[in-house]
Amino acid sequence: MEMEATVQNILEQETLKWVFVGGKGGVGKTTCSSILSILLASVRQSVLVISTDPAHNLSDAFQQRFTRIPTLVNGFSNLFAMEVDPKVENDDLTNDEGMDGFISELTNAIPGVDEAMSFAEMLKLVQTMDYSVIVFDTAPTGHTLRLLQFPSTLEKGLEKVMALKNRFGGLLTQATRLFGLGDEFSEDAMLGKLEGMKDVIEQVNRQFKDPDLTTFICVCIPEFLSLYETERLVQELAKFEIDAHNIIINQVLFDEEVVESKLLKARIRMQQKYIDQFYMLYEDFNITKLPLLPQEVCGVEALKRFSEHFLSPYQPTLTRGTVEELEQRISILKSQLEEAELELERLQKGKQTA
Ligand SMILES: Nc1ncnc2c1ncn2[C@@H]1O[C@H](COP(=O)(O)OP(=O)(O)OP(=O)(O)O)[C@@H](O)[C@H]1O
Ligand SMILES: [Mg+2]
């Protein structure tokens, strides 16, 4: 029933230029985008992984400091990482380029235009850098979709500005002169800049809507809220005409038969219910399941080790009814017995000293 799949299809799609990784908070987006970028670096000429999350967790995953300048990841010759924070960059823009007064009012009139501008700046920069493929570790769902809406946000903003310009004629130009602002702050320069951004954004938007160039990978966990969010995400992506044909279900618990804990057994059953629903709802997606590890996935070595689950379906270490399973059960019982004996010994010692 369940067709076991992997993300191998992403590595094989040689035309891919933009890979978005998104999903609810904490499900494993950064882990998955880091690993995907490592895997892509083994088959593509050069890879850039970008975090657009202000929480900046690529640095945590790779255990290396990254900034908004692409930096080579330690141990690689063709894998770069950068972390951008829309808010901070916009502050810089305001300070460096004197975007104050009526110009900032102008941008205030267009909600989201500042973020759109810094996103466009970043894309423009990245495009000139000529990476074969760019992986986006996106912020939790809401923010991601806003980011993909930027082209239309900016378009609407520009229409507004144009309308204002037509209505007030040279008034804005006069105002810039009056306040002694240089030519680069003039209305025409600003409009020129916005127009320039628009070109980049339009070009990028065309690329984002081309399934040969762009795909979105949804990361989730086998729980109700995550299933629900994934469905919302998949629908929104369809609305924006952005291709999505991979779902990664992270933090899956396996090995029901050898698990002793009642809690774990219950959670495994719960997970299975949602996993079944994922397979039912997303028949035409590649669904990759990743096991929940006892520890976090931190540092290049851990990421590389975990990456094997991205390329071959996870095999629970044990299958029911085998000699191996019996041996495992016996060893669990043995260790429980040992613990009990130790506990007994401790109790007896306690009695003696009392
Ligand atoms: N399968 C797994 N087993 C164990 N730990 C995991 C697994 N996947 C991710 N983790 C750990 O869970 C934590 C959250 O993962 P990650 O940072 O990738 O999530 P995220 O979706 O990017 O979170 P955020 O929304 O906060 O950016 C990290 O510490 C990571 O090492
Ligand atoms: Mg993250």
Image (cartoon, grey):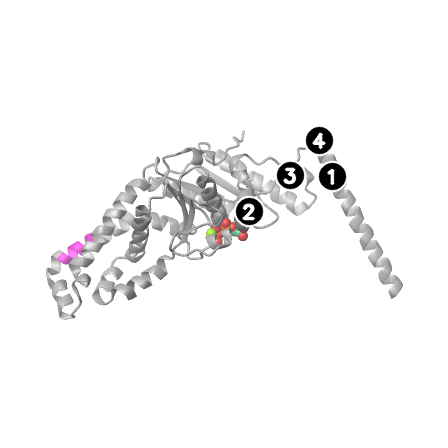
Which residue is at 46% across, 57% downward?
65
Which residue is at 57% across, 36% downward?
314
Tell me where the magenta segment starts and ends, as one range: 158-165
Q: Residue 217: horizontal and vertical position, in percent?
A: 43, 41
Tell me the number on the disc at residue 255: 3
**Pointer 4 local density, CA inside 10 Å: few below 14, some 14–19, many at least 20:** few
* Whether label 4 touches label 2, CB < 8 Å: no
Q: Kindly report which numbered mark, 1 or 2, lies closer to the viewer in this rendering.
A: 2
Which residue is at 14% across, 63% downward?
172
Tell me the number on the disc at residue 3: none
Lateral position of residue 72 relative to residue 158, left or right: right
* Whether label 3 touches label 2, CB < 8 Å: no
Q: Which residue is mark 1?
A: 329
- Give the total number of marks visible in the rendering: 4
**Nearer-N-terminus badge (4/2):** 2
* Amino acid type for the residue under numbered disc 1: Arg
Q: Which residue is mark 4?
A: 322
Q: Quadrant of the C terminus?
A: bottom right
Q: Quadrant of residue 325?
A: top right
Lateral position of residue 173 relative to residue 69, left or right: left
